[in-house]
Image (tube, rainbow, N blue to C red):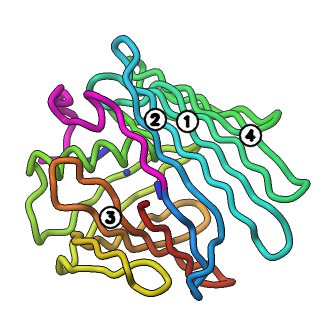
Amino acid sequence: MLLVLPGTLGAQAAPASWPPLATGERLIYKLLWPSGLPLGEAVLDASRADQEFRLSLTVDADLPQHHASYSFSSTATDELCSLRFRQRSQEGRRSWEESVEFDQERHEARYTRGAQISAVSVPECARDPLTLLYFFRRQLAFQEVPRGQPHNGAFHLGADFSVSFEAVTPETVQMGTMGTKVWEGDRYLISYVGPAGRNSFEVWIRPDLSRAPVAMKVTFPLATYTAELQ
């Protein structure tokens, strides 16, 4: 879950009236195996501090061979241009950290992972994955994204990742082991291409002002996992 966009998706001042950023939000997701058994939990947070937005995502999952936990945090400007991005990951006994510092005036980003440090050029108002997620949701909320057309964008995480958002027919989805929870959502196929190749996943987004993601399906070699909003 993790998108600088051209044309109608260019940088604009974030409307102060959009609730997820104006008053903050906390979204809790249950992570499920294909059978419906619980796998773990993910929490998405947004808040405002002075003239900056603070975004975070934490993920805890019990995989077959080990426990995995991931923490992502981002700080962005009023225009939803990235300032800082941090990622901490632990998979069993293996752990690592990486970070990106954005200099929007110089159009540069400094990427650090362990002892490796690199600097790359980035476009105006470059965005990390978390900031791009909120930027895209806000664009949807204020109908600045034409429906029924694919859109292209990018996020920056030590390298450029191109992203495409393809709207699919809106649908009602039943969640939970017995399908007891029903969500109405606009379905999107999100694909991104980076140095390691191409990946994609499906997400259902609530068709109201919040544009909160209500469900996601991600395919890995082991299985296809689901995240459901609680």
Amino acid beneath label 1: Ser
* Residue 179 in magenta stretch: no
Q: Which residue is mark 4?
A: 97
As rendered, which of 31 and 195 lies closer to the eye?
31
Among numbered discs 4 and 3, the one appearing first in the sequence = 4
Q: Secondary structure at mark 1?
A: strand
Amino acid beneath label 3: Ser
Among numbered discs 1 and 2, the one appearing first in the sequence = 2
State the image coordinates of residue 55 (x, y, percent, origin top left): 46, 35
Q: CA distance from mark 4 to mark 2?
A: 17 Å
Do the CB atoms of the residues marked 1 and 2 lie less than 8 Å apart?
A: yes
Q: Nearer the viewer, mark 4 or mark 3?
A: 4
Q: Which residue is mark 2?
A: 55
Q: Secondary structure at mark 3?
A: strand
Judge whether 47 appears above or below 220 on screen: above
| Highlighted magenta segment, given as a residue range | 8-28
Q: CA distance from mark 1 to mark 2?
A: 6 Å
Q: Which residue is mark 1?
A: 73
Q: Which residue is mark 3?
A: 164
